[in-house]
Image: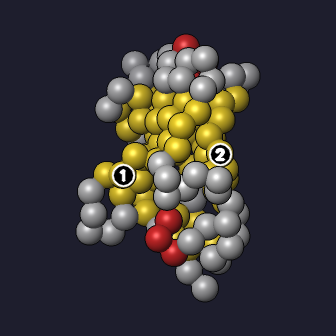
Amino acid sequence: QVQLVESGGGLVQPGGSLRLSCAASGFRVSSAGMTWVRQAPGKGLEWVSHITRSAMTTYADSVKGRFIISRDNTKNMLNLQMNNVKPEDTAVYYCDLLGQRGQGTQVTVSS
């Protein structure tokens, strides 16, 4: 069965960087389009980024130019490199496969 486990979150200062990972099992990340979504405190889910099976990537305007989505097919993982983070990036981040998500990883951007 499909399982997704996010990791890599933590406390980071504004302008800093963080790398999130999502370990997948039950399917190959190389054969699926996958998404990162996030949920800030008191808000709904927000789409962040998507990578297609052919590795085309798209980003929300709020993160474009700062975040990079990628796959590690060898490790069967989805990654999100977060650069120049802002306080408004504070949220629980989830990797998503057709609506199925893991437990999420908390990212807090604060000085």
Query: Which residue is denoted by mark 2 in the rendering?
Result: 68
Horizontal side of 20 relative to 4 (left or right) equals right
Q: Is residue 31 visible?
A: yes
Tell me the crowding category of disc 1: few under 14, some 14 to 19, or many 20 or more residues within 10 angstroms, Cα based.
Answer: some
Separation of residues labelled 1 and 2 (CA atoms): 16 Å
N-terminal-most mark, 1 or 2: 1
User: Which quadrant does the N terminus fall into?
Assistant: top left
Q: Which labelled disc corresponds to residue 46?
A: 1
Q: 10 Å neighbourhood of mark 2: few (<14), some, or many (≥20)? A: some
**Residue 86's spot in the image, x, y percent?**
56, 71
Give residue 39's quadrant in the image: bottom left
Q: Secondary structure at mark 2?
A: strand
Residue 19: mark: none
Q: Residue at x 68, y 22 (%)?
A: 73
Task: Please provide percent x and percent y for residue 4.
Answer: 47, 34
The amino acid pointed to by label 1 is: Glu
Q: Is residue 25 visible?
A: no
